Image (cartoon, coloured by chain):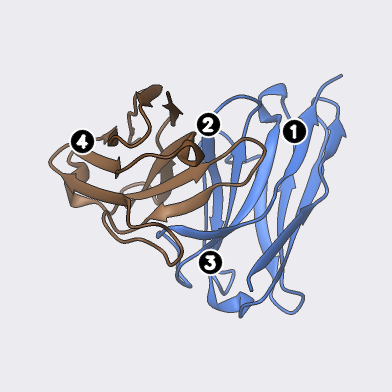
Chain colours: A blue, B brown
Amino acid sequence: EVQLLESGGGLIQPGGSLRLSCEASGFTFSSYAMNWVRQAPGKGLEWVSLICGGGGCTSYADSVKGRFTISRDNSKNTLFLQMNSLRAEDTAVYYCAKDLTVGGGDWFDSWGQGTLVTVSS
Amino acid sequence: SYVLTQPPSVSVAPGKTGSITCGGDNIGTKSVHWYQQKPGQAPLLVIYYDTDRPSGIPERFSGSNSGNTAILTISRVEAGDEADYYCQVWDSSSDHSVFGGGTKLTVL
């Protein structure tokens, strides 16, 4: 059974940094692209970033490009999202989501339960 | 960037058929995927590749995609189908995934 467990969320001041983690199990982690998707309180889903299975390719939403960095450690079956220069509008539940293929660009067939990031002074 | 447009809300009586649209420029040339999200829960894939259902999703859920509109159809709607529904595509011109704004399905 695929399991994705996010951690690292919390309350952070504007301009601060936070690193989210997503520990994966139940599948061959390096064989699948992974994504971060976020959901602001009471709002819809917003795709944030993608990293392919080998880690050599990444993509970012315009809203986070240059501030967020996605990475993965395939030896530890863990996905990361380094978030810098955080803004109030980054407040959201952040989900990690497994893609269908190693290269990504498909659908998200498994999701974690999410971790809440609150950016506020 | 590519934009997907969904109606904010759809209401349907139990036992009837409900449809949720997802509009986008030439969306018929893309693969559309649909997710169901209930309050406090993570999204759940209900339709992929326009029309296919993952295992465990009832046959009452179906999809279509043509021209500028994709449609999620739920037949014989039940109270348990009440949720937010989101369409999603991959925009290869920007290498971005895109979600629609979401539709709240209310079962009357």
Q: Residues within 10 Å of mark 1 (few under 14, many from 20)?
A: some
Q: Position of residue B55 (x, y in %)?
A: 43, 67
Question: Is A48 positioned to the left or the right of A24 in the image?
Answer: left
* Circle 2 residue: A44
**Real-space Cα distance between discs 4 and 3?**
26 Å
- Give A75 or B65, whichever is nearer the viewer: B65
Q: Secondary structure at mark 1?
A: loop
In this rendering, the label closer to the viewer, 2 or 3: 2
**Real-space Cα distance between discs 4 and 2?**
20 Å
Badge 1 sits on which subunit?
A: A
Q: Secondary structure at mark 3?
A: loop
Amino acid type at mark 1:
Ser
In this rendering, the label closer to the viewer, 4 or 2: 2
Q: Residues within 10 Å of mark 2 (few under 14, many from 20)?
A: some
Amino acid type at mark 3:
Ala
Amino acid type at mark 4:
Asp
Q: Position of residue A93 (x, y in %)?
A: 69, 38
Are discs 4 and 3 located on one and the same chain?
no
* Circle 4 residue: B25
Q: Position of residue B72 (x, y in %)?
A: 30, 42
- Give A106 or A65, whichever is nearer the viewer: A106
Question: Is B32 positioned to the left or the right of A60 in the image?
Answer: left
Image marks 4 and 1: residues in contact by CB distance under 8 Å: no
Question: Is B99 positioned to the left or the right of A69 in the image?
Answer: left
Q: Residues within 10 Å of mark 4 (few under 14, many from 20)?
A: some
* Circle 1 residue: A85
> Residue A121 appears in which quarter of the rendering?
top right
Q: Secondary structure at mark 4?
A: loop
* Circle 3 residue: A33
Which quarter shows the N terminus of chain B? top left
Q: Residue furthest front?
A: B15
